[in-house]
Each structure stands twice: as C-alpha cells, then as structure tokens.
Image (spheres, rainbow, N blue to C red):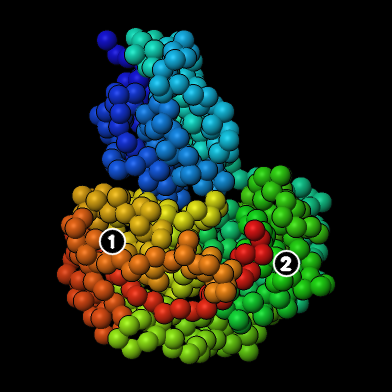
Amino acid sequence: MTTVAEQVGTYLARLGVGHAFGVVGSGNFVITNALRQAGVPFTAARHEGGAATMADAYSRMSERVSVLSLHQGCGLTNAGTGLCEAAKSRTPMIVLAAETAAHQTHSNFAMDQEGFARSVMAQPARVYSPETAMRDTLRAYRVALRDRRTVVLNLPLNVQSAEAVGEIPDTMVEPRPDAAPSAIELSKLSEAISASRRPVFVAGRGGRGAKQEILGLARATGALVATSAVAKGLFNDDAFNLGISGGFSSPLTAELIRDADLIVAFGCALNMWTMRHGKLIGSNTVIAQVDVDDAALGAHRPVDIPVLGSSRGVASALLGVFDGEERTGYRTAEVRDRIGNYGRWDQTPTADLGVPGHTIDPRELSKEVNGLLPAERIVSIDSGNFMGYPSQYFDVPDEFGFCFTQAFQSIGLGLYTAIGAALAQPARMPVLGTGDGGFLMAVQELETAVRLKLPLVVVVYNDAAYSAEVHHFGQDQDMSTVTFPDTDIAALARGFGAEGITVRSIEDLHPLGQWAASSPNKPLVIDAKIADDGGSWWLAEAFQGH
C-alpha cells in the first residue's frame, strides 16, 4: 500500500524541490524518507530552528524551492524564528509540518498549527484528505514558487497514514512571468530618467534576475548602481558600482547617493536600512520604486513614481526607450576615479584599535581574512554589532556569494545560514561572519557542518558580550546582563571535530592561509578576540529603528 505521506513526498520531488532539511520524528519519518527515495537530498539538522534557516538560505542562494520537514507541534514551534525570517524575506519554501488529527485534542502535540503559521507571517495550508492530497500539494507548491511564499503544509497523521488515491500527475509549474508596467507608469519613469543628471539605481533581492538589463539601462542613462545588502555583488563588474546602500555604506557611497537627483529602486524595499532612515535621500531627490508586489510600493516611504512590474520587465522596456543613448550623467571620469580609490571601507583610513598581545582590530582582522581566502566563496552573516565588518570587508564573486538572513533581525542564524548556503553553492568556500553571542546560540549545528565535511571558515568576532546593547546603552549602565566571561571558542570547535585557532594579532592568522590551501574537508573556527570599537559605524543608525 502506498500511503498519502509517500505520495506527497514523491510528488514534491517530481515538482522539482531542490533540497530538504529537518529533524525527523515519528510524524515526519515516512514523508522524509519518501522525499529521499525520490531523489531529494536531505540534511538532518540538530535543531528545527537550524533546519529552517538552512532551508531558507538554500532557496536564496539556489533559487529553488526548498523543503523543511518537521514533527508535529513542538517540531513546528522550534522552527518558529527561522520560519519568520524566511516568511518576511519572501523565501519560496515548503514546510512539511506533521499535525495531530483533528479529534486528538488531548494529544501532547496538539496545537493550532495554522494560527502559529500565520503568527510568523507564513502561509498556512493543509492536506485535507487522500482524495485531495495531490491538489493540496500542488496548490502549496504553486504559492511557494509563483508568489515567493513560505508555505506551512500541515499533514494530519491520520491522513498521512491513509491509503493514497490516484496516480501522481505529471505537472509542470513555471515561475510567474515577468510583469510589464503600464504605458503611463513607464512614461513617468522614462521622463524622470531623461530629466535626471545624477541618477542612482538601487537593486534589491527582487532585482537580482535583472542584472544585465539594469546595468544596460544605467550605462545608457548615466546612472550609478548600488544594491541593498541582500543583493551585494550584483554589479561587481561595473566601474560605477557603489556597493551596499544604507547603514553599511562607505562615506563616499553615502555621499554620492545623497547627491543623486533621482533614485530608482528595482525590487528594493527602500526601508530604513537601505536609505538610513531617509538620510540618503536629498531634499529634492525624485524617488521611483519598481516592484511586482503592489503592497510593497511606498510601504516604507513616500514614492514619487510607483511602478508595478518586474525589475527585468521594467528595465527591458526602458532600454527600448533609451536604446542607442550614451548619456554621461553621473558616470563621469572624476566619479569613476573616486569610486575606484575611495569607494570601499578598506580604502578608508582608520586607526588600529588593537591591543598588542590581547586584541585585534575587527577591521584589520577582516581585511586580512579577506586576502587569505579564495575568491570563489559564499559569505553568510549573523546579526550583531560586528556585522558590518564581514559584510563590507569580505569580497564576494557575485549576487550568489552573499547570504544575509536579517529580515527578522535575530542573532544566532548565521551558522545555519552558512550551512544552507554552502549546500546551494557547493563549488564555493563557505565563510561565516558571526559574533560570540550568535555563534554560541547555534553551536550545536557545528556538528552538522563537521558531519557534512564542509570547508567552512567561521570568523567569530569575540568580545565576550552582546556588544550592540553594551554600546547602545553606554558603560554608565549595569552591563552584567550583557557581558560574559571569555569563552575558549577554538577549544569548543575542536570538541565538535572542527579545527580551531585563537587570534589576537595578524600573525595569528597564518594558519588560515595554510588551511585554505590544503583542500580542507572540515570547518575552521577562528576565535578572534576583537578590540572594543566603541560601537560600529552603522549601530547608531540601526537602533533608531527600534
């Protein structure tokens, strides 16, 4: 007998899900094995929260629908933070959540799973019966893929174990086609671009599939290009690339964006991070926003020209308008030279804060690590005071080299992110920038990275504190709740089977180069004892949004 659980797992594999993650219990045992037997790779995590963010990162870096497999009740709640991060980020993901049968109201595992899914902003769904199982599964997959949603597909135990009805259909689901703007919207935007003398195009995650079209339009119309943090690397090959717009921006990047007379956002939210609470917008700057989601237009700030459409569709249509033009605009030789000489944070002079023999300046640490690692890498970032250093000082090869799970602003997601991203881009060396607080929250998944033989570099910016709070509230307050005794994180890493080194100076990083050149098959954890930076440059801006 083929059960509904086996049928659903096999059908999802046939639909094309890319990778499954989870923690297996009695409620999701059969369906997980059905996925595996149908050819879907499965990674067993040590905690459901870790599995959720691994699946999220995998989808972001592969652009395929991932699967998260969970036990009923507590398995789902354990995954809550990761689910909320994925849902807020519009990550296409199917969550297979086992569920107690409706009549089992006294089960230890009983809970309102649909209500829980809604509370973390995910889309609830259910397999209602053997007769509807294939339709229910297809509907969930379509929503995940075409609407870019995190869908919690509840699977009641009595339905899972029932005999399957019917054959698995041969169904193909295509991504949603590019949406084209109306003629009126396009004319308003083209007129604004024509009138602009200093345009800047900022692409977010929604602009990642329109790289060539946006660049072509920028070169035709004289626009500088930048990205939000989640799209870092998108315009690496362009001499007029400003890098990340927002709190992480270098001083020159912030200056050039602030002086723009037109900002066009392609698939970018224009939120407080990307625009520094509006401080990167000049008093007379015209703002245009392009997005496939009508609700996203003007959601974070007033927009002069809202354009409903895909980034590729809009940029392609505008290229037709400006075909053959080569306006200089903002793309002058002077601006190009300034960007080349001063556009990056590692080109900005800073005093060395390190104390010889005790601590290393986080900027000097980041510059040295960046130079010792291979160019083909995929960088993931945890949250905390430190996060601007790896985000800006670590180079990435392209937009699929940087994974930034920060929509929910939870610390502790970094290690999970790095594992999921590594599995999505296996030809690249995975690199994680994390704080000591976030790393210790997630340390159980270091065993997962060791088991997977990942050549993962974990750079722990260790100041034995939740330093965002230390710097935000000031040293005149009682800091005992957010400061801790120093932890030997390198020794902890070795206990999990990884390599571990302690770094207090540039010289202490020499083993990193040797390790990177050795074709490693296990993680290396760098316990970097960092100097107090007095609060990183982006921190004051960040706390204004709380």
Q: Quadrant of the N terminus?
A: top left
Q: Image check: 411 left or right of 543?
A: left
Q: Image check: 68 left or right of 46?
A: right
Callout 1 secondary element: loop
Q: Nearer the viewer, residue 434 or 518?
A: 434
The tag on residue 403 is none
Q: Position of residue 505 (x, y in %)?
A: 31, 83
Say which amino acid is labelled 2: Gly
Q: Nearer the viewer, residue 385 or 59?
A: 385
Q: Position of residue 401 (x, y in %)?
A: 41, 62
Residue at 36% x, 81% y is 359
Q: Quadrant of the C terminus?
A: bottom right
From the image, tell me which residue sits under label 1: 456
User: In the figure, residue 22 lies in which quadrant?
Assistant: top left
Residue at 72% x, 67% y is 278
Q: Nearer the viewer, residue 415 or 492?
A: 492
- Give the mark nearest the N terminus, 1 or 2: 2
- Position of 99 relative to 387 (above/below): above
Q: Image check: 280 left or right of 55?
A: right
Q: CA distance from mark 1 to mark 2?
A: 37 Å
The tag on residue 278 is 2
Q: How many marks?
A: 2
Q: Residues within 10 Å of mark 2 (few under 14, many from 20)?
A: some
Say which amino acid is labelled 1: Leu
Residue at 44% x, 15% y is 106
Q: Position of residue 113 (x, y in %)?
A: 50, 26
Q: Is residue 187 visible?
A: yes
Q: Nearer the viewer, residue 84 or 196?
A: 84
Q: Image check: 498 left or right of 190?
A: left
